[in-house]
């Protein structure tokens, strides 16, 4: 069974940091592009960041709203992709989910993801 499990969410004050983890089960994440998404209360889900597979040099992309304070990276030995979030603001509050895409092309994040995790909640207070 292909599965992604997120962890690392929680409550933090504005200006703080959190590191989210996305662990793969039944799939080797290095062969997939991994994306992070978030959904704030009452809003649609939005893409935050993605990292392409090793064939595409693990190239990473970020939404404009986070590119100066989020970092995505892999630890292949742990079959895990991380999202380091610094300088958090209340606008970063939401449920964060990771997803894996098998079909990867260079130049940007995939338009279709095959597997999604359940999500982890991030709450940033002012």
Image: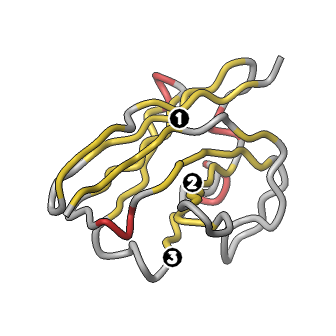
Q: Is residue 16 left or right of residue 84?
A: left
Pointer 2 or 1: first along the chain: 1
Quarter of the figure with the N terminus:
top right
Q: Residues within 10 Å of mark 3 (few under 14, many from 20)?
A: few
Please name the residue that numbered disc 1 is placed on.
22
Asked whether the viewer can see residue 91, the reply is yes
Q: In which quarter of the image is residue 125?
A: bottom left
Q: Residue at x 51, y 64 (%)?
A: 60
Above or below residue 124? Residue 67 is below
Q: Nearer the viewer, residue 91 or 58?
A: 91
Per the model, the C-alpha gap separating discs 2 and 3 is: 10 Å
- Residue 80, percent from left and from top: 50, 31
Q: Nearer the viewer, residue 3 or 32?
A: 3
Please name the residue that numbered disc 2 is placed on.
36
Disc 2 and disc 3 in contact, CB within 8 angstroms: no
Q: Residue at x 53, y 35 (%)?
A: 22
Q: Residues within 10 Å of mark 1 (few under 14, many from 20)?
A: many
Residue with the most extreme front position: 42
Name the colouring of the figure: secondary structure
Disc 2 and disc 1 in contact, CB within 8 angstroms: yes
Pointer 3 or 1: first along the chain: 1
Pointer 2 or 3: first along the chain: 2
State the mark number for residue 63: 3
Above or below residue 72? Residue 116 is above
């Amino acid at each position: 069974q292909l599965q992604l499990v997120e962890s690392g969410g929680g409550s933090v004050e504005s200006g703080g940091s959190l590191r989210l983890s996305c662990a793969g089960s039944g799939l080797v994440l290095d062969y997939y592009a991994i994306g992070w998404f978030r959904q704030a209360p009452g809003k649609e889900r939005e893409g935050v960041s993605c990292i392409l597979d090793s064939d595409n040099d693990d190239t990473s992309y970020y939404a404009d709203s986070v590119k100066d304070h989020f970092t995505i990276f892999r630890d292949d030995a742990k079959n895990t992709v991380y999202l380091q979030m610094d300088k958090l603001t209340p606008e970063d509050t939401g449920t964060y989910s990771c997803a894996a895409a098998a079909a990867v092309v260079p130049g940007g994040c995939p338009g279709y993801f095959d597997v999604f995790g359940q999500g982890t909640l991030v709450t940033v207070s002012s």
